[in-house]
Image: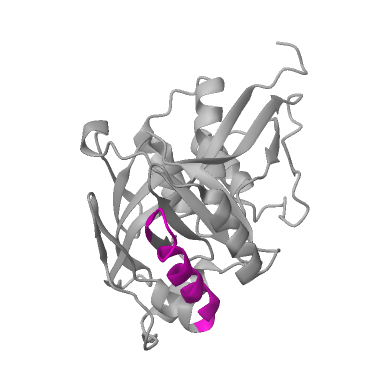
Amino acid sequence: MNPDTPLFRREAPAKVNLWLRILGKRPDGFHELDTRMVRISLSDTLEAWRRPDGSGLQFSCDDPSLPVGESNLVVKAVRGLEAELGRTLDLSIHLHKRIPHGAGLGGGSSDAASVLLGINESLELGLSRSVLGRVASALGSDIPFFLWEGACDCRGRGEIVEPLSPGAFPWRPRLLLVKPAFPVPTPWAYQQWQNSREIPGVDYAARPMPWGDLVNSLERPVFAKHLVLADLKQFLAGQPGVSGALMSGSGSVVFAILQEEANPDPIREKIAAEFGGSTWTSVATVLP
C-alpha cells in the first residue's frame, strides 16, 4: 500500500432522536431510556494511515476547539480496541469535523463507532458486532447505535439497540437543524432532569407522527436554563412547510421536520433575523 493512501476513510453520520423518554433513574446512576434514533446525512470524516511498528497512535483534528488527547472519544475507541486485542495499534488518524459538538447530534459517539468499524474492517481483525458493541458501550451510551445502519430503538441507558427493518421505517424526510452559539453538556442535562419543572406556556407535549410521538424528556431541564431553545422550537413549529419540531438529545440543536415541498431558505433567513447571525443551520436528510 502507498504510504499516502489511507488505510480507511469513513463518514461518521450525525443522529437525531425522534423521541427520547426518560423512564427513571437507575441504581447505577444512569437513566433508563426509550429512544428512537436515526442517522442523518450531516457527517464527520475520519481517515487513518498505518504508522511504523511500535510508534503507537497519532490523532489530529481540524477543529482546534476539540481536545486530541486521551479524553477524545476517537482515542478512547482505539484504546478500547487495543485492550481487547492485547496489543498496540500503530495508526495515524485525522478527523475532519463538521458536526457541531454539544449539539445532541452524537458527533463524538459516531466518530468513535466509525473508528471501531474502520479499524476492524481494514485490519481484518474479525471482531464480531457483539464484541465491538461491548467496547462501544464501555465508552458511551450512544456509541453502540452507530455500529448499526438505519433507524434503531434504543433502551437501557441507550446501549441496548434494536434495529428496525427498512420496511418498518421507510421515512426519509429532510430536516432543518438549528443550533445557537452555545453547547449543552449531556451529563448536566441528565443530572438536572429529575428536579426540573415545566415552564408555563411552553409546549412539551408529545406530537403524534406517522411513526410515533415526537417528544423529548430532556427539553424540560434544558429549556429551564436556555429559554431561547423553547422559543426556537415554537418558532420552527409555526413555520410554513414544517410538520413538527423537537430538540435532539440533550441539545442544543432543535430540528424541524420539513414537508416534501418545503423550501428551507426563507426559514433560515428568518432564523438569522430572529435569533442572530451566529446561529448555525444545516439541512440534512434521514439516511436509510
Percent of width and height locating residue 30: 37, 68
The residue lying at 67 percent from left, 68 percent from top is 276
The residue lying at 31 percent from left, 44 percent from top is 152
Percent of width and height locating residue 16: 43, 52
The residue lying at 66 percent from left, 30 percent from top is 47
37 vs 23, nearest the viewer = 37
How is the rendered protein coloured? one colour
48 vs 106, nearest the viewer = 106
Identify the image quadrant of residue 249: bottom left
Q: Which residues are magenta?
A: 225-244
Q: Is residue 187 left or right of residue 44?
A: left
**Considering only vertical position in the picture, is 96 above or below 64?**
above
- Is 242 part of what is drawn in magenta? yes
Name the main secondary structure of what is drawn in magenta.
helix
Percent of width and height locating residue 154: 30, 52
The residue lying at 62 percent from left, 26 percent from top is 9
Percent of width and height locating residue 208: 23, 60
